[in-house]
Structures are given as structure tokens and as C-alpha cells.
Image (cartoon, rainbow, N blue to C red):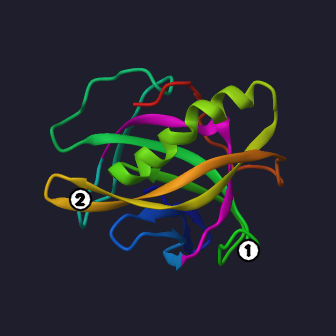
Amino acid sequence: MLEVLSGSSAEFFSWGSQDATFKVDGEACDIKKFLVDPTSIRTGFGKLEKGSAPDWVWAEVAGTRIQKPSEEHKPAFSVLVYVTKDGGSPAEGYRDWQSNARAAREAIQSVWKEVHDGAAKNADKLAIIEVTGKRAEQVGPARINVPVLKVAGWAAKPGEAPAKKKNAGADLF
């Protein structure tokens, strides 16, 4: 996951498939709703190793195929989200959600076509994403929990988003 450094604290958004919970800035919380900036999506590959900084390799245009950098790299995505206390977050504001975890990838893929298609009719707006539950899935010997998401509408951008390379595409991974 990407950590956006703001002052001395790391700000990020993540999904933990083993404990089946979202985390904002490392704090587990019961997220029910968040916003997604459809222009911020990036796809590519990521490698996470304990004790090392994440190694992300992004396609120039999201959804296009790029060469896998190594066998240790897994498909990955990055998208800018906006979280609120009303939506279940302990903090408010923009956070990066970057992951190469299968559960997170499946969750964002499940709504991305609708987000991408809706963005054309909702310029300069963010998609409202509702978390409607989670589903357990067997992946080889492991059992993961995938958050179940749905597009619930569109909202005006709440303030200025942090600068991020934009390369939105319709098809992910």
C-alpha cells in the first residue's frame, strides 16, 4: 500500500482480507461508504516484502498490459479515495488505496466498469462507493474475505485532491 506522507504520520487506506476490515492510517474501522476518484486509477504490478519499501510498477495507461517485472510482483492497483467520519473512518480526507492483494483487487474490479462509465456523465465528481458486506473465498489453501462494494451515486469533489498521476482506463488488470 502507498503511504502518503503528511507531516510525520502516514496516511493510507487498506483492506485486510484476513481480519476482514478496512484500515485508515493503520487503524481498523467499520467503513460503510467512501468516495473514489475515477481519474486516479493506476494499474500495474507490486511487490511487497517485509523490511523493504513497496516496489510499484505502473502502466502508462491503466488497464493496459505491461511486462511483469519479476515473479515476486503481483497485479496491483492504486486509486485515490476520500474517507469521512460519517462513512465510518476515524479520520477525514484523501487517502491512497494501493494494493496487490487479491481481495482488494477483486473488490475494486467489481465496481470499476460502472465507475469508469459513470465518470463520463459525472465530470469532476467522485463515485460514492458503499460497502454492503464481505464474502469469503477459497484461494488455494487460503481463505480470504473480499469486501462487497457497489456504486451508490456521485458527489462533488470535497476540496482539492493531492496531485497524482492520472491515467484512467476502463479495463483493469
Tell me the amino acid under the disc marked 2. Answer: Glu
- Where does the image place residue 136, in percent across and percent down from the top left? 35, 61
Magenta-highlighted residues: 29-46
Distance between mark 1 and mark 2 Cα atoms: 32 Å
Q: Residues within 10 Å of mark 1 (few under 14, many from 20)?
A: few
Task: Using the image as rendered, state which of residue 24 and residue 141 is in the foreground.
Answer: 141
x 73%, y 30%: residue: 119
From the viewer's perspective, is 156 left or right of 81? right
Residue 54 percent across, percent down from the top left:
34, 54
N-term-proximal mark, 1 vs 2: 2
Check disc 2 and report the residue beneath it: 49
Q: Secondary structure at mark 2?
A: loop
User: Decide: marks 1, 2 in contact (CB < 8 A)?
Assistant: no
- Secondary-structure class at tag 1: loop
Relative to residue 70, is residue 54 drawn left or right? right
Q: Residue at x 76, y 72 (%)?
A: 86
Nearer-the-camera pick, 136 or 28: 136
Q: Nearer the viewer, residue 21 or 46?
A: 21
Seen at 57% across and 40% down, the residue is 111
Residue type indicated by callout 1: Lys
Q: Position of residue 11 (x, y in %)?
A: 57, 66
Question: Would residue 38 appear left or right of 58 to someone viewing this image?
Answer: right
Residue topped by disc 1:
85
